[in-house]
Amino acid sequence: MTSSEQQTKEVPIINALTVDVEDYFHVGAFENNISRDDWDHLPCRVERNTRRTLELFERNNVKGTFFTLGWVCERYPALIRLIHKQGHEVASHSISHHRVTDLTRDQFVEDITKSKRMLEDTIGAAVIGYRAPSFSIGERNIWALECLKEAGYIYSSSIYPIRHDHYGMPSAPRFAFHPVAGSDFLEMPVTTFEFMNKKFPCGGGGYFRLLPYKLSKMAMNRVNIKDKKACIFYFHPWEIDPEQPRQANASLKSRFRHYTNLDVMEKKIENLLNDFSWGRMDDVFLGVND
């Protein structure tokens, strides 16, 4: 067999497909416009949009990890059980989308312990993964990763190694690392690609929705081929819902970030699912089902 023939027969890298299960009114961009006291009185679309996401994944025969709010689990337990039943991983995204930077250590421990127990009681299986709301773990609160380990989590995907006005830890490694000395606990940063010694985001969210698809595809291919690493991609169910209620009192910047290209997002994701190979976080990085 020639080297070129061997290359074409190489198994493609399996990337990690993740969904942050939250509704449009949970997002940090609207926290100054929508009171938490009003959440239960607003039109809730997370169940509808998450089911639509599950149908999208089923059409394309892919499995993923659903980082789920306890708020959603408490109100839609049948939805969380369906996610688990269809072979996806259920992981924690906190109880009520409080940034870790807004919590004391004791409050954080209470939150991650309660959310883990709630999800496990709902699906009848262990929950081992966590993602901080708004990627709100960084240099100032790196202690949170030790708390996660002590609470029984095996991994986190809470750090974005970029500079952003709301989050980011540029000094963090680009790929999975062990942040707690003497422990196998893993932190798995959302994917970035390197260009001219600088890190740029290519792991989904608003960047994927706002920028041309070819740019994201190029960047992820670069990570798979040049770095020989799996990508971690994420999006939210509300991002495939162009009919969601509009928040006219939000800032122009927040409205631009939140609403731009909602009408094309589902098609872009479908292209992504066809152009790359995908799996759950626990399968891709921990070999749970090997």
Image (tube, rainbow, N blue to C red):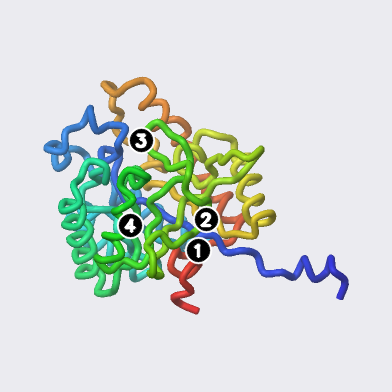
Left or right placement of residue 222 versus residue 172 in this view: right
Disc assigned to residue 175: 2
First-in-chain label (4 vs 3): 4
Disc 2 to disc 3, C-alpha distance: 36 Å
Write down the quadrant of residue 152 in the picture: bottom left
Amino acid beneath label 2? Phe
Q: Is residue 139 left or right of residue 227?
A: left
Residue linked to disc 4: 145
Q: CA distance from mark 3 to mark 1?
A: 26 Å
Residue at 60%, 57% in the rendered image: 276
Q: Which residue, given by chain and number where applicable, does mark 1 sit on?
A: 62
Q: Nearer the viewer, mark 2 or mark 3?
A: 2
Q: Are marks 4 and 3 in contact (CB under 8 Å)?
A: no
Q: Which residue is mark 3?
A: 243
Q: Nearer the viewer, mark 4 or mark 3?
A: 4
- Give me the residue at 66% from left, 50% from top: 222
Residue 244: image x %, image y %?
32, 36
> Does dot 2 land on a helix, a strand or a loop?
loop
Helix, strand or loop status at disc 4: helix
Mark 1 residue crowding within 10 angstroms, few (<14) / some (14–19) / many (20+)? some
What's the distance in space between the residues labelled 2 and 4, CA to CA? 16 Å
- Mark 4 packing: few (<14 Cα in 10 Å), some, or many (20+)? many
- Reading the chain from its start, which is encountered first: label 1 or label 4? 1
* Residue 6 on image: x %, y %: 80, 71
Q: Judge from the rendering whether residue 39 lies leftward or rightward of residue 213; answer left or right.
A: left
Nearest-to-viewer mark from 2 and 1: 2
Which quadrant is the N terminus positioned in?
Answer: bottom right
Rendered image: mark on residue 180: none
Q: Earlier in the sequence, mark 2 or mark 4?
A: 4
